[in-house]
Image: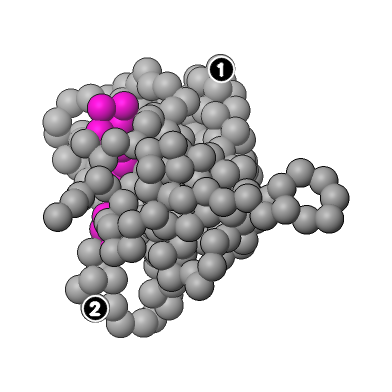
Amino acid sequence: MIDVLVVDDDFRVAEINAAYVSRVPGFRVAARAHNASQAMAALEREHIDLVLLDHYLPDETGLSLVRRMRQFGHHTDVIMVTAAGDVATVQAAMRHGALHYLVKPFTFSVLRSRLDSYAALRRTVSRVGGSGQSAGQEQVDRMFSALRTTGPASSSGLPSGHSVPTSELIRDVLSGALQPLSAHEVASRTGLSRSTAQRYLRQLEQTGRLRLTLKYGDTGRPEHRYAWAVPGSDGAGAGK
């Protein structure tokens, strides 16, 4: 489970953002804060993996808070969630290591795509072996590509709320399996929740990238099992 700190000076916006986070499988809201002081206190008190951080806070800016976090040894990941859309602030956020930058207002599907890509990044880093291990170029490329998200008109053909890294993760698992897998088995091997695995499997099957078969048991409904339909495909619609 990924623990999130939601920071926004507007109590109503913080409630909405927290509700959004709670709807994404694999994420939970560990704490909320409405100013920088409360945010720092939460970081000292709670285990936090990710901060959804507003820039306009009453006691200091979000970027100033990120600088203080680093000075005090808090290397928690940050996604900026703010109405500040000026280029200078965006560039400063990038320099301070913000993984994403969302300009208010935004929809749940937009935030979900960022959270999905963040979860994919964590899984990719975990498979590489952690911060103390060496990574080859292919592994480095996977870590950087994990942060890329897809929108409604993405050339990948994925709908809003679906990320390319997660689809690639499912592709890797299915293409490497010796036999078709159930949604439960895909979820177990990828680290995704079963509902997320089912959502991606359903979409990939509808676009012809997966082959669906039914396994009948002695009782009950048949079990859906999935296999990658095109061995060696990159899952993004590329062909020879």
Q: Amino acid at mark 2?
A: Gly
Q: Amino acid at mark 1?
A: Arg
**Name of the residue lying farthest toward the right:** 219
For residue 93, say whether it is visible: yes
> In which quadrant is the N terminus drawn?
bottom right
Secondary structure predominantly adopted by residues drawn in magenta? loop
157 or 106: nearer the viewer? 157
Report the residue at 27% width, 56% height from top: 234
| Residue 230 part of the magenta segment | no
Which dot, 2 or 1, sits closer to the camera? 2
**Magenta highlight range:** 142-154
42 or 152: nearer the viewer? 152
Instruction: Tell me the residue that label 2 is attached to.
Output: 136
| Secondary structure of the residue carrying numbered label 2 | loop
Report the residue at 78% width, 56% height from top: 217
Scheme of colours in the image: one colour
